[in-house]
Amino acid sequence: MFTGIVEKIGTVLELTTPESVQFGDQGVSLTVGDVGEVLTDARLGDSMCINGTCLTITDMEQDSFTVGLSPETLRRTNLGVLKKGDKVNLERAMGVSTRFGGHFVQGHVDGTGKIVEKIPEGNSLWLHIAPTDKDMLRHIVPKGYITVDGTSLTVCDVNDDEGWFSLMLVVYTQSHVILPLKNVGESVNLEVDMLGKYVERIVDHTLRGEKTRETIETMVRRTLHSSAN
């Protein structure tokens, strides 16, 4: 579990893909350097969040670490298109005594999106992001949480017709995450608020139950009848 508060911006040192293997198969690993303090208490097998993706540390050096990328990770995220020198957001898994400054982030990316517009306003920066799967917008609400490349952010607005949502980055955030470094058209990893997904799942199953549906309809009829009288 993570909070979406980025601890460090690392640098991609290598994305290793054996010549006989394509993305989506086995054998892809990612090595990240310039990691500094995020390895202070890390051990092999620990979880590390890279651009919003929860991954397992398989090797460590003094200022770098390596993780393996599974076929599902490559399908769901933008990690497979990283190249040497790219910057990535890093966050260690939260501890029991960690101050909880962001929101509940699982590191389970729902899908990717593209930056469709960047608009400066004063010293802040507006971003409009369009999810690749437009259906994801049903889980995104104004003033709700969303994780973009591992950063916990507040949604400002949602445009269902045009298929995008907006965020505003203050000066401090701009200098501590990779989002401002990306150009219009570039890809970002998205994880919607997990609480919304659980509520939808529970309500969906509840409404599918015939007896429960009858109970709800009865309650609605009684309420309408009472209001009419």
Image (spheres, rainbow, N blue to C red):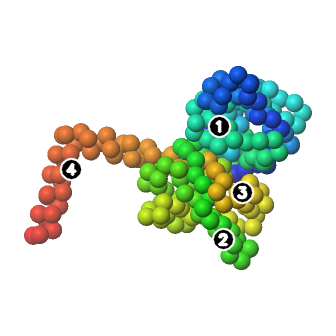
Q: In front: 71, or 100? A: 71
How far apart, in angstroms, are the residues tagged by discs 1 and 3?
21 Å
Lower position in the chain sequence, tag 4 or tag 2: 2
Percent position of residue 44, x then y: 76, 26
Nearer the observer, disc 4 or disc 2? 2
Q: Is residue 49 above or below residue 142?
A: above
Lower position in the chain sequence, tag 2 or tag 1: 1
SS category of the residue bearing label 4 = helix
Type of amino acid under label 2? Ile
Q: In front: 161, or 171? A: 161
**Residue at image location 31% in from the left, 40% down from the top:** 205
Residue picked out by circle 2: 119
Residue picked out by circle 4: 216
Nearer the observer, disc 2 or disc 1? 2
- Are the two marked residues, 4 and 2, in contact with CB atoms closer than 8 angstroms? no
Type of amino acid under label 4? Ile
Report the disc number at residue 54: 1
Q: Is residue 97 left or right of residue 103?
A: right
Residue picked out by circle 3: 182
Nearer the observer, disc 1 or disc 3? 3
SS category of the residue bearing label 1 = strand
**Residue at image location 44% in from the left, 62% down from the top:** 160
- Are the two marked residues, 4 and 3, in contact with CB atoms closer than 8 angstroms? no
Q: Residue furthest right?
A: 62
How far apart, in angstroms, are the residues tagged by discs 4 and 3?
48 Å
- Are the two marked residues, 3 and 2, in contact with CB atoms closer than 8 angstroms? no
Lower position in the chain sequence, tag 1 or tag 4: 1
Q: Is disc 2 surrounded by few (<14), some (14 to 19) or many (20+) residues within 10 Å?
A: few
How far apart, in angstroms, are the residues tagged by discs 3 and 2?
13 Å
Q: In front: 87, or 25? A: 25
**Residue at image location 17% in from the left, 51% down from the top:** 217
